[in-house]
Image (spheres, rainbow, N blue to C red):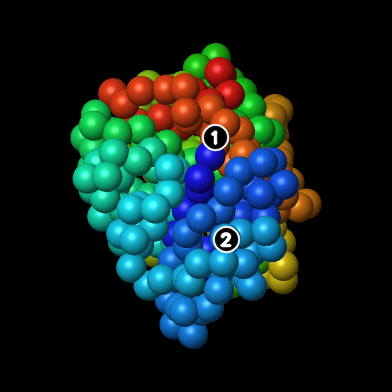
Amino acid sequence: MRVGIIGCCGRMGKMIGEMAVKNGHEVVAGSDRGDNVGKILSSVINGANHTKIVDNSEDVFKIADFVIDFTVIDVAIFHGELAVKYKKPLLVGTTGLKEEHYAGLEKLAKDTVIVTSANASLGVNILKSFVKKLASILDSSYDIEIVEMHHRNKVDSPSGTALILGKAAAEGRQINLDEMAIKERDGIIGKREEGKIGFATLRGGDVIGDHTVIFAGNGERIELTHKATSRELFVTGVMKIISWVKDVKPGKLYGMDDVLGL
């Protein structure tokens, strides 16, 4: 597969590119910003083509057979539109996507293959399925709290993975997460409202990603936890997507559940 990476000089972009080469794919194009523009791609990603890094993501779609976007939420829809224009499959790995982004990408996915994955980890996606199942079994007397911790430089809050887990819990309870989520408690007075899904965000050090979903009932507490100790686990998931995407057709917005058959 001829792979193009938007945000190729970022930490994830570099790791994805080098892992893709090791897995027999070609990294043929990359875009970035600032001083990275104009550099030779192979000087940033070992084994990549000797093409220049561009600042126009559209040029990546022109060259690559499959485009990977690990940048920011503001350009997710734009990249989806480019994927449709050039009929190229797209992976949006950006975290922090909101409902309007998913809705926009879902419309675009009718015309080209688009996969969204805020977390491509096998463990996180298995955890998500457990959370949904447990939420469907336990009634609202079990309060759901989601605690996440990441490194000090992470900009979005709660994390995309925390929101994925919250959405899974909401689906299990057959409720709307946007209506039932509590993402901050500053200024809230009074007892916890039954049925709400709470989020707690911690930032510090170089933590890659810790997530715990707590079901707190009377007399007992169930906790499901995933801790990432290497970013390679995310990259391994992306490699699964690259191999999987060539065999699917447009029609819906795909996620890791589809890739992993969960």
Which residue is found at the position 35% from the left and 52% from the top? 61
Answer few, some or many: residues within 10 Å of disc 2's Cα (few below 14, many 20 plus, some between 14 and 19): some
Cα distance, mark 2 to mark 1? 21 Å
Q: Nearer the viewer, residue 164 or 122?
A: 122
Residue labelled with disc 1:
241
**Which residue: 56% across, 53% down?**
27
- On the question of residue 196 being in view, the answer is no
Which residue type does callout 1 highlight?
Answer: Ile
Q: Quadrant of residue 149?
A: bottom right
Secondary element at image label 2: loop
Instruction: Count the labels in the image.
Output: 2
Residue extending farthest right: 229
Please provide percent x and percent y for residue 76.
Answer: 33, 53
Between 82 and 167, the one nearer to me in the picture: 82
Residue kind at label 2, given as amino acid type: Asn
Q: Indicate whether 154 appears above or below 257.
A: below
Residue furthest front as drawn:
50
The kind of secondary structure element at disc 1 is helix
Which residue shows up at 48% across the image and 71% down it?
52
Please tell me how crowded label 1 is: few (under 14), some (14-19), or many (20+) other residues with Cα within 10 Å.
Answer: many
Residue 49, numbered label: 2
Spot the residue most to the bottom: 35
Confirm whether residue 219 shows in the render: yes
